[in-house]
Amino acid sequence: MTNGDLTIRLIDASDVDAFRSIRLEALRAEPSVYASSYEDWASLSTEEWLKRMSEPVFVAFQGDDPVGLTGLLRQRSAKMAHRATIVMVYVREGLRRTGLAGNLLDAVVDLAREIGIRQLELTVSAENPAAIRFYRREGFVDVGRIPRALLHEGREIDELVMVRRIG
């Protein structure tokens, strides 16, 4: 997908450096909203980064510069293979409210439908109202709350569980 000088694509092993760059940027820029920490990922070997790319990962590029990211984790069990979790959603600060997050989500939804996913799920920090509003606008509904799901700098942060049917 292309939008002006922005391109979104499903990345492969040749994009490992771009993936590393944008994922670490996300974890550094928004440390309280992700279950993972910068430290969790910064010391990974290239082989570990490649393993994390075994599930679909989409990166938004402005020229050659990675500026956004999202991934999809499909459930493995046969009875749950119609479900997948959206992970690692991030858009660089200067590109927020431009439609890029929606475009990244559209790319994930299109792929999910192609591979037979019927339900998308995600968790979002209860302290991230902009993300919660975005997901609700995109058709996700709240189905639960995980109290004290994240521990960041001594603070316990709840997460909302959200679901969207796509098939």
Image (cartoon, rainbow, N blue to C red):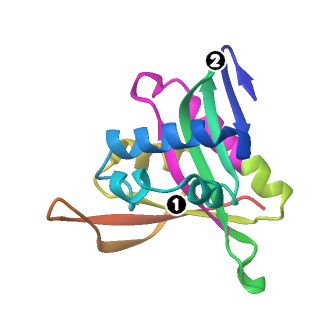
Circle 2: residue type: Gly
The residue labelled by disc 1 is 141
Q: Residue at x 38, y 62 (%)?
A: 35
Q: Is residue 131 above or below residue 74?
A: above
The magenta region covers 84-108
Mark 2 vs mark 1: give the one in front: 2
Residue reaching furthest to the top: 4
Label 2: few (<14), some or many (≥20) within 10 Å?
few
State whether residue 109 is above or below residue 121: above
Task: Quote the CA–CA distance across marks 2 and 1.
Answer: 34 Å
Is residue 52 shown left or right of residue 39? right
Location of residue 152 (image quadrant)? bottom left
Residue 96 is inside the magenta segment: yes
- Residue on which disc 2 sits: 63
Determine whether the residue tagged by mark 2 lies in a helix, strand or loop.
loop
In the rendered structure, which amino acid carries the disc numbered 1? Val
Task: Tell me the quarter of the picture where residue 55 sits.
Answer: bottom right
Please state which of residues 25 and 130 is positioned toward the viewer in this rendering.
Answer: 25
Q: Residue at x 35, y 74 (%)?
A: 146
User: Residue 47, how many percent across, how many down?
Assistant: 61, 57
Establish if 13 lies above or below 47: above
